Amino acid sequence: MAAETKNGVLNYSDNEEEENFSDDGDWGDWEAADDKDDDVLDFLCLFCDSRFVSCDLLFDHCRLSHGFDFHGVRKELKLDFYASFKLINYIRSQVAENKCWSWEATVDYKDVNFPWNEEKYLKPFLQEDSLLYSFADDEEEDEEEVLDREDLIEDLRKLGDLSIVDEEAIGVSSVSNNGKCKDLKQSSVEGLAVNGKDEKANVCDGRLVGRNVRKVNENYFGSYSSFGIHREMISDKVRTEAYRDALLKNPSLMSGSVVMDVGCGTGILSLFAAKAGASRVVAVEASEKMAKVATKIAKDNKVFNDNEHNGVLEVANSMVEELEKSIKIQPHSVDVLVSEWMGYCLLYESMLSSVLYARDRWLKPGGAILPDTATMFVAGFGKGATSLPFWEDVYGFDMSSIGKEILEDTARIPIVDVVEERHLVTQPALLQKFDLATMKPDEVDFTATATLEPTESETEARLCHGVVLWFDTGFTDRFCKENPTVLSTSPYTPPTHWAQTVLTFQEPISVAPASVLSGDDRLGAVGTEECPASSIHLRVSVARASEHRSIDVSLEATGVSSKGQKRRWPVQIFNL
């Protein structure tokens, strides 16, 4: 076995073993090989199957990919060597019992009991665990900081109990508002590998208990304090004009109505509502800075509701879930609820849960929600939507090796970019549709199937390098009687600031229309140039991720030939 390293991750390949005996029969070469192997230690991640050549690389991976900062935890909890040794074994035992186990989901530093304080965790959980004997190699202990064991335990006991998320207790087949972890095994094809590994695809729900949601919210709302972001959104004519038309061109809906704008930002939608003849406009904004900006803009435009301006618009600096603390408003008193809540891939960083809360709390029975539908679409893209063409000819030089490496990386990371219609190699397919007037919050997590058919105009096979996702939101005639409209982020329409979301296959799939393939007896694996697929069957699962306001997407692709033969590719997991 020879070991190669890439980005600190060990990759093994089979090579012929050479004898290490010297002529006199001693084991000198064997010892030299041992010394060499010591420089490439095999460190297994605490939470997944990734392996690394050093503790530092392993702990960086744990921190960035799993939200577990080993050194930070040791410092925060003041763990000595033996307590840290136990902690490693404890985590390995929990992960072995429950693949969805998450450190951040179970630990609140204000509520910790020290569950690894058992002698059984002094016994290595793994037979050969290099991490146990290396994590403190570079440490310089300060004797003044070494705490008495009993004092340490007593201090930790004072903090409370540490709860563990139990997969048996929470269930793994579904996700609810109070759920902890969604198991995608029901949406995975039996025997498939996850990102190239033979395991179940577990996706954790963004409502995980103990998550520091407040900090994430502060960062999220704080990021919208930048005027540059608001200029980009307002300058997006597709976005802004769709909302303008829905609000200004439907007088039977807006005249005399009480309107709530969730996440008002600069207040542009609230200004439209006031101009359309609303009797009261409640603009809700969680960012303190932007709430002040929206107030100043409303006053400058003489629509603010105070003694000086006598307008209809009021600004509440609050999350909509805490609105009653900021203003006086009766439940179910709003006629029209409007919000521009959509994120990349529709659901990333979206405010949909807050909008649905506002709908259920403040909207009158039969009241209007704008937009009232949201629909996700998918299509396959070709080489032109990748970076390969650029790197194939750089001032006459072939740099395609860079393009190929970038393509390999994008098979693990979703990309937000504008994909042109001419670079699509399949027809679009409907993935999922939401009725915002009736949907439940849990419906954000879904599994859907779609079939991608090659573009009929094609006369030869083309490589499908992955799929592109986009969404439309509808202001339908259910509420917008006079002027229904659609906001589309499709590759077939002018680009928006949302662009599209690109998920790249680990290996491209050759596709061609059935009409091109009919009558041919083709040899080779389905999806190769020798035997192109006549369609690609997709199964896509979307769930709120362990990181608040993020989503996990699992992608499964099956190529089907014109003769009905099938080939399945490993399921891929993307975090957005």
Image (tube, rainbow, N blue to C red):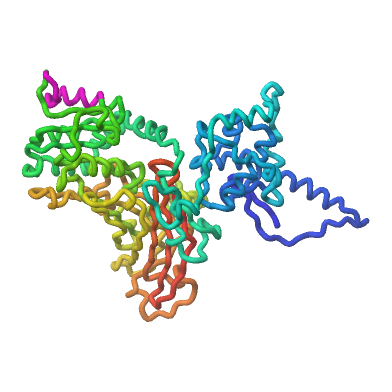
Q: Taking the image as drawn, is residue 391 in sight?
A: no
Q: Is residue 35 visible?
A: yes
**Residue 440 is covered by the magenta coloring:** no
As rendered, which of 501 and 123 lies closer to the eye?
Answer: 123
Q: How many marks?
A: 0
* Nearer to the camera, 177 or 407: 177
**Hey, which quadrant is residue 39 in on the image?**
top right
Is 255 in front, or is 21?
255
**Residue ID at (67%, 44%):** 121
Q: Which residues are magenta?
A: 292-307
Residue furthest to the top? 308
Q: Is residue 276 above or below residue 51?
A: above
In which quadrant of the rendered view does residue 504 lie?
Answer: bottom left
Q: Position of residue 462 (x, y in %)?
A: 39, 64
Whether residue 111 sits left or right of residue 217 in the image: it is right
Left or right: 62 as drawn, with respect to 299:
right
- The percent position of residue 469, horizontal first and vertical second, equals 34, 53
Q: On the rendered image, what quadrant is the N terminus found in? A: bottom right
Q: Residue at x 11, y 26 (%)?
A: 311
Q: Residue at x 10, y 48 (%)?
A: 483
Judge from the rendering whether residue 341 lies leftward or rightward of residue 369; answer left or right.
right
Q: Is residue 316 above or below residue 379?
A: above
Task: Provide residue 43's location: percent of width, then percent of height.
Answer: 65, 46
Extreme-right residue of the structure? 24
Residue 334: x and y in percent read 16, 39
